[in-house]
């Protein structure tokens, strides 16, 4: 069952009040809801095609995937991929809700030799400086503004977890709207630490005299201990309206993540071993194996050695070992023996980091 807007907001704007956020396992990558004018056959057929486009975009993160010939053929005849669909009315608007066979969708993307973006995705803290009744302010998690709802919609549609600050007394003392507008990364990084996100983005959004909107976006790693001189992403543009600005912002951030976390089949027979220590019961082994199997970088998993409290798994990979380590670095239930001694980097989730020799599973 698809969620109401309130639930979507809770899904997309990860509850900031807990202040214990981390990378997020994104749900409903196989679902989409599309507005329809009526329940006619023609409207249904168009909505199902749109729903499949949405699901392909969620699972690749890249609009260019929609141009792949195999994907275009599948979108033209989406019924082979649909599990079920139905209608729902929300606030006077009808929606067609479609659920797709996720395994078939992933197989389609693999056949088309497209990267697949897995369920575990980076969490981004968004500092958005906006105009409100002539005053500039930072958008907060409890705001009732249309911008907050739009961010939630984009987050849901792109499968891109986004968090807004709560802007309580601690935030208000640590950061000002001018810090974000001025793109003072070190100051904003300090204010971001309490949220434990993977990255933080600063956005300044302003109306222009000709009725359009200009925006400035920068993206930084949240955990870097070095001075933040160079943003990972930077973009400045003038667009027709706020939705166009937010769409471009989500596109830019998503593209950066996709380049690092979406995995294409390299066509090579890549294998590696991953070792977990402090194994105390069989359920841990099952949980670890289940986790490894669902990674978009992994073709197959087998337990090859179990000795005392140490377990070694052999993995066949779609991509490289670096792809695998980047994905594992997003999992909050897994801790590396080398993390405490790791050298800080500009991007702590970069593919250049040295893989740890051993992991500890801290699930459940």
Image (cartoon, rainbow, N blue to C red):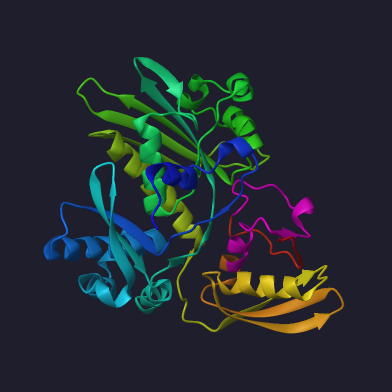
Where, by quadrant of the figure, is residue 362 drawn?
Answer: bottom right
Query: Magenta span has 7?
Result: no
Instruction: Judge whether residue 69 can be spotted in this image.
Output: no
Q: In percent of the image, x 39 and y 53: which residue is there?
A: 158
In percent of width and height, residue 171 lies at 60, 25
Measured along the vertical axis of the image, is residue 290 above or below residue 260?
below
Q: In percent of the image, x 64 and y 31: which residue is there?
A: 190
Which image quarter is the C terminus in?
Answer: bottom right
Position of 314 with respect to 149 (left or right) is: right
In percent of width and height, residue 205 lies at 37, 28
Measured along the vertical axis of the image, is residue 234 above or below residue 282?
above
Which image quarter is the N terminus in?
Answer: bottom left
Q: In percent of the image, x 74 and y 53: which residue is there?
A: 342
In percent of width and height, residue 125 lies at 53, 39
Q: Which residues are magenta?
A: 324-349
Position of 213 with respect to 305 (left or right) is: left
> Observer-nearest residue: 255 or 246?
246
Query: Magenta span has 336?
Result: yes
> Observer-nearest residue: 38 or 362?
38
From this viewpoint, which residue is outermost toward the top? 134
In percent of width and height, residue 334 lies at 70, 60
> Observer-nearest residue: 265 or 290?
290
Instruction: Judge whether residue 273 can be spotted in this image.
Output: yes
Q: How many tags in the picture? A: 0
From this viewpoint, which residue is outermost toward the right? 308
């Amino acid at each position: 069952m698809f969620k109401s807007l309130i639930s979507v907001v809770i899904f997309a704007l990860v509850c900031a009040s807990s202040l214990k956020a981390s990378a997020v396992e994104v749900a409903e990558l196989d679902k989409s809801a599309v507005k329809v004018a009526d329940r006619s056959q023609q409207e249904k057929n168009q909505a199902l095609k749109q729903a499949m486009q949405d699901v392909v975009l969620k699972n690749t993160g890249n609009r260019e995937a929609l141009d792949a010939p195999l994907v275009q053929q599948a979108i033209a005849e989406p019924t082979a991929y649909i599990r079920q669909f139905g209608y729902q009315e929300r606030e006077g608007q009808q929606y067609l809700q479609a659920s797709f066979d996720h395994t078939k969708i992933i197989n389609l993307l693999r056949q088309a030799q497209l990267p697949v973006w897995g369920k575990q995705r980076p969490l981004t803290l968004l500092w958005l400086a906006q105009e409100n009744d002539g005053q500039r302010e930072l958008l907060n998690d409890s705001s009732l503004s249309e911008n907050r709802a739009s961010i939630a919609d984009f987050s849901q549609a792109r499968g891109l977890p986004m968090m807004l600050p709560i802007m309580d007394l601690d935030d208000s003392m640590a950061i000002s709207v001018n810090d974000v507008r001025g793109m003072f990364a070190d100051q904003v990084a300090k204010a971001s630490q309490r949220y434990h996100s993977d990255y933080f983005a600063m956005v300044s959004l302003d109306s222009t005299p000709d009725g359009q909107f200009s925006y400035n976006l920068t993206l930084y790693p949240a955990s870097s201990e070095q001075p933040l001189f160079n943003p990972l992403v930077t973009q400045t543009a003038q667009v027709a309206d706020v939705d166009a600005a937010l769409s471009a912002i989500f596109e830019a951030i998503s593209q950066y993540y996709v380049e690092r976390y979406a995995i294409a089949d390299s066509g090579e027979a890549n294998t590696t071993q991953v070792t977990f220590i402090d194994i105390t019961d069989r359920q841990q082994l099952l949980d670890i194996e289940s986790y490894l199997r669902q990674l978009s970088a992994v073709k197959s998993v087998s337990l090859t050695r179990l000795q005392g409290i140490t377990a070694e798994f052999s993995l066949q990979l779609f991509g490289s070992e670096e792809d695998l380590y980047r994905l594992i670095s997003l999992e909050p239930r897994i801790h590396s023996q080398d993390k405490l001694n790791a050298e800080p980097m500009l991007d702590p989730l970069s593919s250049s980091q040295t893989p740890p020799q051993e992991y500890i599973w801290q699930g459940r």
